[in-house]
Image (cartoon, rainbow, N blue to C red):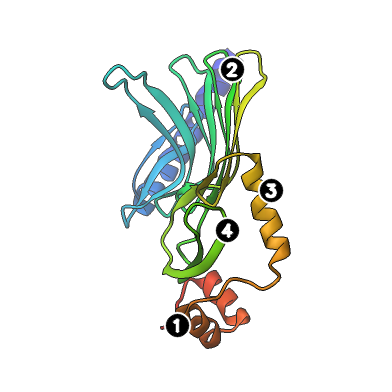
Amino acid sequence: MLYKKIKIAFLYIALPILVLFSFKASAQYKSFILSPKGDTLNIVDKDNLKQGRWVITVGELRGEPGYDEEGYFKGDKKSGPWRKYNSTGDILAVENYSHGGKEGVQEYFTFLGDLERHEEWKGYNPDAPYDTIAVYGEGNNVISKYKLVKAEQYSVPNGDWKYYSAGGKIIKIETYDHGRLLKNAEDKTTVATTAAEEKKEPAKTKEILEYEKKYSKKKRKQMERDGKTGL
């Protein structure tokens, strides 16, 4: 009897708090959902931007099995680790994002939970006004020059991609340099050797020289922090 009275008293206290929280959240967000544990999920703010923790269910499509994924959005862009699960809750992938694009190590698993593939990606920050990319010579892996481009978020393979057998052994390794697939191990050595031998950097374009002259390193760092171009 005493337990029943305590339970009723708790409900009288908890329900108003939950209603008050829901009212406050509804005034702050355009939409959201509450998890069974009471966590606020799938927030869409007043500017129609996804924020905070999200849980997304993707149904089966054209014979491809469905999956669930969870992670965080920041300003409508995926940020940090995201995990994918199959319909029975087994892990399928752990992906890392920055500014909405893949960044760092990505890992993919078999339905038994064994590591199937390891990828490494390089993401570029769209908040910086400009980005410098390398241009390679035809038929080789030697950088011939650099090109200045207006920065937009994009990601490219950069580093080692490892493929595993069912027994967990590495059966294949692909090495990328900023999106460029190196043909074999010798290609990787060639890039390192060339960089060591050529102390003089490849000639910079007129646009890059003007950009570096106009903005000091200190000012460029400030621009990258606050996203302002100053133009």
Q: CA distance from mark 1 to mark 2?
A: 49 Å
Label 2 Cα crowd, 10 Å radius (few <14 / some 14-19 / many 20+): few
Which mark's residue is nearer the viewer, 4 or 1?
Answer: 4
Which mark's residue is nearer the viewer, 3 or 1?
Answer: 3
Residue 142 got which mark? 4
Q: CA distance from mark 2 to mark 4?
A: 40 Å
Relative placement, left or right, of 62 versus 121 is left
Label 3 Cα crowd, 10 Å radius (few <14 / some 14-19 / many 20+): few
Q: How far across and how far down the image is residue 181, in percent?
A: 52, 44
Which type of secondary structure does the marked residue at label 3 adopt?
helix
Q: Are marks 4 and 3 in contact (CB under 8 Å)?
A: no
Q: Are marks 3 and 1 in contact (CB under 8 Å)?
A: no
Residue 189 got which mark? 3
In the orientation shown, which residue stands out farthest toward the left? 62
Label 1 Cα crowd, 10 Å radius (few <14 / some 14-19 / many 20+): few
Q: Amino acid at mark 3?
A: Thr
The N terminus, quarter of image:
top right
Q: Amino acid at mark 1?
A: Gly
Q: Which badge, 4 or 1, comes first in the chain's sequence?
A: 4
Q: Which badge, 2 or 3, comes first in the chain's sequence?
A: 2
Residue 113 got which mark? 2
